[in-house]
Amino acid sequence: MHRSLLTALALSVGLLSGCGGDNSSASAAAAHDVKLQGAGASFPAPLYTKWFKAYTAAHQSVQVDYQSVGSGSGVKSVIDHTVDFGASDAAMKPEDMAKVDGGVQLFPMTAGAIVLAYNLKDVPNLKLSRQAYAGMFLGNVKRWNDPAIVASNPGVTLPDLPISVVVRADSSGTTFVFSKHLSAIDPDFDKGVGANNMPNWPVGTKSKGNEGVTASIMTTPGSIGYIEYGYAKSQNVPFASLENKAGKYVMASTASGQAALASAALPDDMIVWASDPEPGDAYPIVTYTWLITYKKYGDKNKMAAMQDLVKYGLTEGQKSSESLGYIPLPDAVVAKATAAIQNISAQ
Amino acid sequence: MPGTSAAPFAADALFQAKPTDICQAPNPLQMFVDRAFRSTCLVLACGTVLLVGFIVVRIAYAALPAMHTYGFDFLLGRVWDPNTSRFGILGEIWGTLYTSILALAIGSAFGLAVAIFLSEGYLGQGAFLLLRRLKLHLHPMWGRAPDALEQLLKNLVELLAAIPSVVYGLWGLFVVIPLIRPASIWLHANLGWVPFFSTDLSGPGVLPAVLVLSIMILPTVTAISRDALVSVPPKLRMAAYGLGATRWEALLAVIVPTASRGIVGGIVLAFGRALGETMALAMLVGNSNRISLSVFSPANTLAALLANNFPEAGPKEVSVLMYAALVLLAITLAVNIVGALIIQRASLAHVE
């Protein structure tokens, strides 16, 4: 945008003055111009947009565009070669990776937690046991004064209200991570519903997007639903402390999220799910989100820019993630991902 | 401005016959313009038909794999589960028809009432009586108030059509649902045995969707019905009153039946809009495949299903969604055909 404006200005100056000498500097700079087009997950989109804007401002010759079209579309675009890089919350299936000539490289770029936001006027600090919240999303726990909820909230008067479960209507990586977690902690959920971008929920009304679910929760007394931690924080929606595998009740925060991430070692393909982290201080529902690049780029400049962009995100970019409600990557993960940047090469 | 006055002048020379050349054959330029106009219209008209045909064919083509796999069971299935590749849209078909029909009932009742109110001079008459009491009815400015008021109200109703669907959705979510919650809780608690009130209103559901949808289709019904009522020949009105009909009789026995063709046309158009409405319904209907008579239960519609599922659909799911889109098209087409038949009948009855 900025660059094309400059070029246009230089051209018009050249035309007006009648001598062609003026635009030589603009075209010389344009020769190094690299445009990186990305598409994918909407969950990390605010962070990516911020990174890419800052990166483009610092590196005049590289322009990065990112379209938040959803994880599924991101993976599809990578397979179809319509983008230079993709992004996905659900990583990439091995059979999808096999469809890309030359292979793909995944990088965990940031992480997030998923919280259970609720609407109960007089209950500021709700605690939910694993049995309670899995039961809610299976339709077994139907009222707020169910013994399963009362047991973990001693001294709190829970209203005799029906529980209105709100789930995502659109296919989403957030749903995938949440249903994967429920499948990990509850065999009934695993058998009956299963982990999916859009499972067949047995209960609940459905709303589109984080914003739709949040709006439904805020306007419906007695409702509960899953949304991203950063979104819940920015909207000031109360969310529950959840019981983790160690039996402790943990609130979502940067520290508890990082503890959960650190519990799962990153394998060589960079894909790991902390579906049910073990440490006592770990928040139970966290996930990485991945950037997908090709291993081979036809254009050398493009390859260099891609490497540099990933590096920027893993180092400089981590500093801005916490303020937007994401969980900065643990150091070990950053080191491993940085090493993998070398796997990107030019043909 | 010479530029603006030149064009009408040229057009005048072309088309306005002067007394002297009234019996002349059209000159070559006139004939060329005639022909060019006719062929342009023909091309554009055919283009529109071709475009519709192309859309239907493309959707049907994309839906073919799903039609092969699921066949008619697709229309009768009640489960939508990409996880196990089981797809059925009976719930969505039910939700689409149920919300549209309820919204149409409410929307047409109010829309027709507004049209009658605006076209039969009730408002103007009321304003006039008020002005006369204030002795302002011959005032140069105030005397025009009754007409201006009618025009204003008409424009206000038509303005409803200009509000974006997503705004209606938000309004429904943040205003309508909290507003109807106390009443719906009371209805469920006290009249729960009535099938329409048999479940709790948890938030989004059929009733909020229907209420908002009925407001969205109201301008369509009102605008078309009003035009039809206004164009009822004055002599019919006069004759009815002349025969001693009361205003009530004249309205119900003469004016509305005469305008019925236009009114039904407006209702059919509104029904089409209700069937296809997407955004507001996706936000308000609850998107849950339930088949229930209860107006408080969440439901789902075909358009909302498409809107929610397309962005991240894989190739197999796209085919299934195309099949659903084809079903929605078929429903809309059926409604339009039935509407056309009704209009035809109404006009035949009128002629007899």
Image (spheres, rainbow, N blue to C red):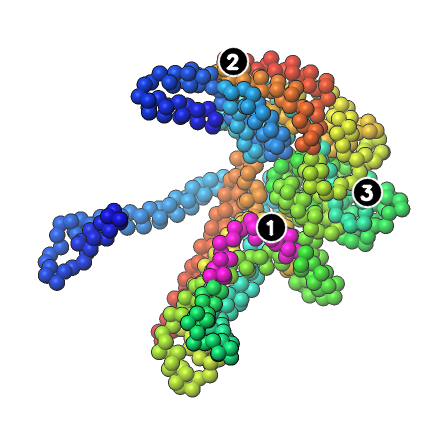
Residue extending farthest to the bottom is B244
Magenta part of the chain: B155-177
Task: State how far apart marks 1 and 3 are (Cα).
Answer: 29 Å
* Disc 1 secondary structure class: helix
Find out whether the residues at labels 3 and 2 contact each other: C-beta distance under 8 Å: no
Looking at the rendered structure, which numbered label has been put on residue A125? 3
Instruction: Give the percent coordinates (x, y) of residue A52.
Output: 57, 26
Q: Does residue A270 appear in the picture of this structure?
A: yes
A71 to B75, vertically: above or below: above
The residue carrying mark 1 is B170
Sequence-wise, the earlier of marks 3 and 2 is: 3
Q: Amino acid at mark 3?
A: Asn
B9 to B19, vertically: above or below: above
Q: Quadrant of residue B229?
A: bottom left
The residue carrying mark 2 is A346
Task: State how far apart marks 3 and 2 are (Cα).
Answer: 53 Å
A269 to B299, vertically: above or below: above
Q: Residue at the spot x=57%, y=37% of the render?
A: B312
Chain name for mark 1: B
Find out whether the residues at labels 1 and 2 contact each other: C-beta distance under 8 Å: no
Looking at the rendered structure, which numbered label has been put on residue A111? none
Q: Residue at the spot x=54%, y=37% of the render?
A: B316
* Disc 3 secondary structure class: loop
Please state which of residues B167 and B269 is positioned toward the viewer in this rendering: B167
Number of numbered discs overlaid on the protein picture? 3
Instruction: Give the percent coordinates (x, y) of residue B70.
Output: 54, 43
B285 relative to A15 in the view: left or right: right
